[in-house]
Image (tube, grey):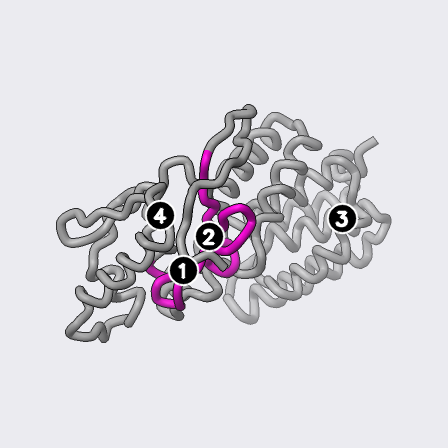
């Protein structure tokens, strides 16, 4: 473990050599230098770091940091304690990262330092673009690479207040990338291998209709039409009993396509 940071060298995309720290928030919150973890301190220091990273250079007020650290019961010494966490981060991260006081809060400039969340956003965007252009192999590669950056749930060793405030947005982005990768695999004819994964996903997210539709399509393309239809009826029942709604157009269209043998639902040639 390193008590402070000096720049390390790595090769950025395009072959450019830069000195950088690598921040990671898609799992436990940490920062790496030469592949080793920089000593950041405990849960509260890591929470402050994550909040500054997610702000992407914008000011995070002391009040906001206090809420993420102590919810709605910050101590009277909130300002002083936040300053202590900021000072520790400055010492740990060295001169490459700048954390400055601005008005009623703090902003962090990371320079050329990397962050797994920014990498995820970049790869996901590239994957979505490739999917829209029907470049399915490239889309699958980019989206698989994006998903590989998750090391469990995001922000896992931040405070419970940080996790409750921010984790849903990370999970939503992760799910969108996962659905995109599955869509690319289905387009490539890789449906049999997807069935076990999609069965687990439907169990975990029973009301997520796009996931259920993807499972129906994968089963249909495996010649398991009766199972695909059963998956639809199970979803319709759950939606009616638990939410009082009918299936969405996405789910209904796949169901009707299976019943009528619509050609575009058949496996890729």
Question: Could you tell whether 187 is left or right of 121 in the image?
Answer: right
Give the label on residue 40, or none.
Answer: 1
Residue of label 2: 31
The residues bearing labels 3 and 4 have C-alpha atoms spaced at a distance of 51 Å
**Marks 3 and 2: which is nearer the front?**
2
- Which sits earlier in the primary sequence, circle 4 or circle 1? 1
Query: Residue, x 25% and y 52% (percent of image)?
Result: 60
Question: Could you tell whether 49 is left or right of 178 in the image?
Answer: left
Q: Give the range drawn in magenta.
A: 19-48
The residues bearing labels 2 and 1 have C-alpha atoms spaced at a distance of 8 Å
Q: Does the magenta stretch include residue 25?
A: yes
Residue of label 3: 218
Q: In this view, does 13 lie above or below 62?
A: above
Q: Do the residues labelled 2 and 1 touch (CB within 8 Å)?
A: yes
Q: Where is residue 243 in the image (x, y as percent from the top left)?
A: 50, 66
The residues bearing labels 1 and 3 have C-alpha atoms spaced at a distance of 45 Å
Give the label on residue 94, or none.
Answer: 4
- Which sits earlier in the primary sequence, circle 2 or circle 4? 2
Counting other residues with Cα less than 10 Å from the Cα at mark 3, is it few (<14), some (14-19), or many (20 or more)?
Answer: many
């Amino acid at each position: 473990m390193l008590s402070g940071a000096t720049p390390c060298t790595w090769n950025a995309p395009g072959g450019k050599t830069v000195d950088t720290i690598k921040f990671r928030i898609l799992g436990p919150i940490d920062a790496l230098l030469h592949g080793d973890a920089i000593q950041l301190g405990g849960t509260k220091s890591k929470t402050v770091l994550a909040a500054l990273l997610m702000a992407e250079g914008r000011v995070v007020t002391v009040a906001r940091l206090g809420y993420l650290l102590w919810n709605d019961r910050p101590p009277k010494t909130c300002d002083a304690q936040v300053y202590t966490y900021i000072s520790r981060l400055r010492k740990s991260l060295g001169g490459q990262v700048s954390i400055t006081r601005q008005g009623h809060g703090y902003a962090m400039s990371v320079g050329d330092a990397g962050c797994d969340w920014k990498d995820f956003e970049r790869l996901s965007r590239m994957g979505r673009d490739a999917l829209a252009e029907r470049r399915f192999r490239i889309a699958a590669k980019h989206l698989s690479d994006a998903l590989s950056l998750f090391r469990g749930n995001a922000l896992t060793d931040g405070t419970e207040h940080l996790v409750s405030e921010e984790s849903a947005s990370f999970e939503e982005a992760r799910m969108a990338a996962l659905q995109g990768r599955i869509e690319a695999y289905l387009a490539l004819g890789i449906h049999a291998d997807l069935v076990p994964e999609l069965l687990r996903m439907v169990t975990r997210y029973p009301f997520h209709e796009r996931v259920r539709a993807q499972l129906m399509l994968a089963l249909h393309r495996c010649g398991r039409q009766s199972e695909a239809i059963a998956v639809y009826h199970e979803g319709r029942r759950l939606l009616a009993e638990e939410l009082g709604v009918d299936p969405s157009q996405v789910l209904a269209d796949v169901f009707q396509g299976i019943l009528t043998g619509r050609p575009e639902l058949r496996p890729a040639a």
